[in-house]
Image (cartoon, rainbow, N blue to C red):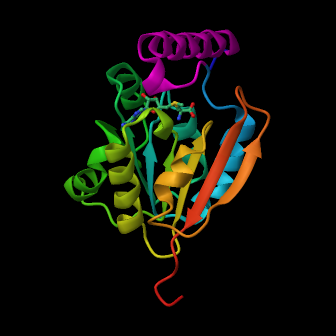
Amino acid sequence: MNPRFKQSERFRDRLLFVQEFLRHPRQVASVVPSSRCALKRIVEGASIRQASTVVELGAGIGGTTRALLSAMRPDARLLSIEINPRFHAHLSRMDDPRLIAHLGTAVQLEKNLADYGLDSPDAVVSGIPFSAMDQESGCEIVEAIASRLAPGGHFLAYQVSTRVEQLARPFFPSPHVEVVYLNVPPLRIFRWTKPAANG
Ligand SMILES: C[S@@+](CC[C@H](N)C(=O)[O-])C[C@H]1O[C@@H](n2cnc3c(N)ncnc32)[C@H](O)[C@@H]1O
């Protein structure tokens, strides 16, 4: 692709992200998409290369989606759930047979997995702002992740706030936490691993 065209496309994507942040600040929760450094830590932290089913919650303009797809196996599947119709429309233009782009809320995770006939995910990667969500929805999402995640699978949440840690306490053992300073603003990456069936 022509580098100029690529640059202007990146500019348009970023503009869309800012516009949607201004329209729905609590839902989008960030003025800029996750940095390259954060994407690398997310992909590595969730062991995406080994996964056969991956779920992404809150794809935005698809930077995380692209990073996940470029690390995933050719036979793996990615269900990407995004609540914002403009972000979803953008995501749907991604041409990758492994990707299922779904317009809807993360609260419907269990139903979506069943509707698309997907196995228990090996990784759930989430950028949705748990801090801006009501307690009931947050709990429902984390409980569904804990129950549907494959044994040995990872739930990784990249967040500015620590609220998700409190929501996850009844359902998971303690998380591994890493801070990514090369991101605006700095991000915490929480990772929970579901105990393996025999452990
Ligand atoms: C902080 S942005 C992350 C975007 C992108 N993954 C990144 O890292 O740049 C949070 C995203 O979660 C989406 N979102 C918020 N609440 C959601 C929900 N309940 N279900 C699905 N997506 C949601 C927002 O529309 C937004 O795209």
Q: Is residue 197 above or below residue 29?
A: below
Q: Can you name the residue that lies furthest to the bottom here?
A: 198
Q: Nearer the viewer, residue 25 or 74?
A: 25
Q: Is residue 25 magenta?
A: yes
Quarter of the image where one finds residue 72:
bottom right
Residue 112 horizontal side relative to residue 23, left or right: left
Quarter of the image where one finds residue 92:
top left
Quarter of the image where one finds residue 44:
bottom right
Q: Can you name the residue that lies furthest to the right here?
A: 181
Q: What span is colored magenta in the figure? A: 3-31
Q: Position of residue 81 (x, y in %)?
A: 37, 40
Residue appearing at x 57%, y 32% in the figure: 63
Residue appearing at x 61%, y 66% in the figure: 174
Q: Position of residue 166 (x, y in %)?
A: 52, 53
Residue 152 horizontal side relative to residue 136, left or right: right
Q: Is residue 4 above or below residue 1?
A: above
Q: Nearer the viewer, residue 150 or 78?
A: 150
Which quarter of the figure is the C terminus placed in? bottom right
Q: Is residue 31 above or below residue 199?
A: above
Q: Position of residue 162 (x, y in %)?
A: 60, 44
Which quarter of the figure is the N terminus placed in? top right
